[in-house]
Amino acid sequence: MPSFSGVKSGAMALWLKRAGRWQRAHALPSYLPPEYLRLSPSASGPAWRASGPLGRYGADSLPEFLEGLLLACRRPSGGADRGLWLVTATGGLEPAAGIPPFDPRELWRPGLELAQLRRPRDKWLLTLHVARPGGALLAVRRERYLASWRTALEGLLTACRT
């Protein structure tokens, strides 16, 4: 369990970086879905860090980060369409029942990225850089999905808990 600023606890935590130091945060501040967000594993400090316009936040686990993002979003839904689509290698879209389960430790840098699309509106392109079994070896693959902000976060949370 990481310890920052002399704080050590068995409970998971969210973190905020202020004045160059990581401090515990009970929750993330409310926000509107950004145009871009990356959550990536970190070698020092919190195990997971956010990059993008939300600020300098971290978390001890990816599920905790996703839960914090879901709770703090001021506009949680992305419209009436709550579908999730897999972006195929040819650039086509296929309906997806969900994101295949993965262990968050199998995400490699840059981790996962959410980028807002201009069209269709209120949709984000989710890119996962995940190591999946490829025969006897783990192979890093880039998987892409299209969904509303909330649907993408909920899909990620479900996939990394199963």
Image (cartoon, grey):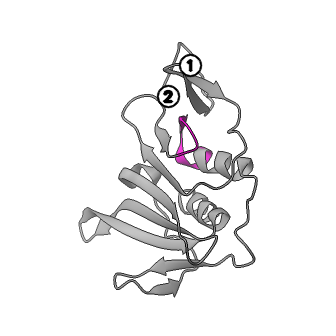
Find residue 10 and report its horizontal and vertical position in percent: 60, 27
Find residue 137 and report its horizontal and vertical position in percent: 24, 63
Label 2 secondary element: loop
In the rendered view, would you say 103 is above or below 91?
Answer: above
Please indicate, yes or no, whether residue 162 appears anywhere in the rendered image: no
x 70%, y 39%: residue = 29
Would you name the residue on which mark 2 appears? 1
Dot 2 and dot 1 residues touching (CB under 8 Å): yes
In the rendered view, would you say 119 is above or below 23?
Answer: below
Closest to the observer, 66 or 149:
149
Magenta region: 53-64
x 73%, y 49%: residue = 71
The quarter of the picture where residue 142 lies is bottom left
The quarter of the picture where residue 133 lies is bottom left
Please indicate, yes or no, whether residue 149 appears anywhere in the rendered image: yes
Find residue 101 and report its horizontal and vertical position in percent: 50, 65
Does the magenta run of residues contain 61? Answer: yes
Residue type for callout 1: Lys
The quarter of the picture where residue 54 lies is top right
In the rendered view, would you say 129 is above or below 15?
Answer: below
x 54%, y 80%: residue = 96
Find residue 150 and report its horizontal and vertical position in percent: 67, 63
Which residue is at the far front? Answer: 118
Would you name the residue on which mark 1 appears? 8
**Mark 2, residues whose alpha carbon is within 10 Å: few (<14), some, or many (≥20)?**
few
